[in-house]
Image (spheres, grey):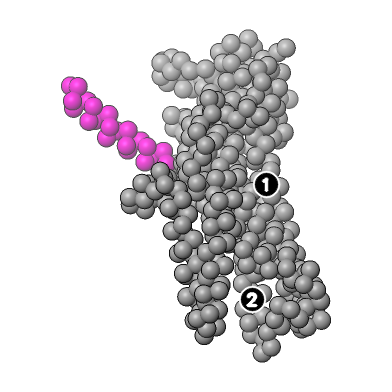
Amino acid sequence: MSWLDELSLELCARGVPRRERTRIVIELDDHIACEPGCEDRLGDPRALAASFGDELATSAARTSALVSFAALAVAAVVLIVSQLTLAGFSHYPGYSNGLSMLLFLPALPGMVVAPQIALVAGTLAAWRALRRRRVARLPAQEIALIHRRARVALAAGFATMAGLELYVIDFSQRLPAWWLGLVGGLAAVAGVGLLAASRTRMRAGAIISGTGGQAGDIYDDLPVPGWRRLRARPWVLGALASVAAGLALGAFEGHAEHSVFEGLQRGTFEGLAAAVGFVVLGRAIGVRPAPPPAESAVPAERSVPPS
Amino acid sequence: MILATVAEEPAHGYAILQHLKQRSSGAFDLAEGTIYPALHRLERDGLLSSSWSTDSGRRRRVYRVTRAGTSSLEVRRREWKQFAKAIEAVMG
């Protein structure tokens, strides 16, 4: 097998996209043609492919996090427009006056809980990408963390748009046609944007990095003085975040609805939802400590077999 | 060093490497392949741009410095001169 063939195979094994792979091989082919027999001086093809893979995986993960954030921002605007225009109607339809509770029950968490998950996970993914924008090769575990955050955020973004569409269907006989058309159409457009961002993320996730090192967590992302001490007691952070979210939403809703009871009710729900989110998704998006590091820097299923 | 080389004239990977070797009197003895990830990185960072050309029927990627690359090169040159001057002052 020639040096170039070996390089091509190694690039393929590392998930380097076809376009990049072709370009690299043509450039190296030209290099060898300039001085036939210089392959020995080019170095180990496996090491060179690893170098390309590490850098491309880093760059693609950063790009996909930012693209995901942009797509989520569009979805957020759609949700805000839908709620602002809905609030402008003199008769708010209420939750039980639609076609079916079977439509409303999945729509509610989609419109209320999922956007908050998307906001937290998407912001953390984009923030990590921006914060580490000057690093040529991020550790494989850190790249995986960026992808997990973006994946959770995009899934929550989809759930939000799906919830909005279900709401549109549920109240299709109660709300004006222009609102149904506007919100239904905008949610579909935002859904297409999220789909495009998901494709970008999946392509980026296919590139394998072998760079060692730790992923880091939320304590590295947010430089709040002294709060790294909470790393040893993650449940304190979870409790604090849940209480803060509950109090903030409770105060806002209590004021908006002119009702202490409404504020208490919604604040309690928000606090509980935040606590559940911390338990279920905390580790995936790096707000709870990761399990003890594995022996290898690269997860077993993503490591490249020797050629 | 790559930026400084390409700033003189647009060049392909092999030519850049030969220029570097020549200028440094062979002081930089790196695996030659390592220049390509560096070139791709500089292009991703917007400091270089590249395009295909054809030479003797062979496709060749030619790199040139962008405006951002020229500015970055100036900054790095200034920093290096200050650093070298400081070392010179200490070492004598």
* Relative vertical location of residue A270 with respect to residue A306 in this rendering, above or below: below
Tag on residue A130? none
Residue stretch in magenta: B72-92
Mark 2 element type? helix
Q: Which mark is residue A83?
A: 2
Is residue B84 magenta-colored? yes
Q: What is the distance, in whole Å, between disc 2 and disc 1 at their CAs?
A: 29 Å
Q: Quadrant of the C terminus of chain A?
A: top right
Are discs 2 and 1 located on one and the same chain? yes
Q: Mark 1 falls on what kind of element?
A: helix
Kind of residue at disc 2: Gln
Q: Position of residue A36 (x, y in %)?
A: 64, 12
Q: Chain of mark 1?
A: A
Q: B4 or B33, which is in the foreground? A: B33
Residue A60 percent location from the top left of the image: 60, 41
Name the chain under label 2: A
Q: Is residue B12 left or right of residue A177?
A: left
Can the viewer see residue B15? no
Side of B33 where A2 appears, left or right: right
- Residue topped by disc 1: A200
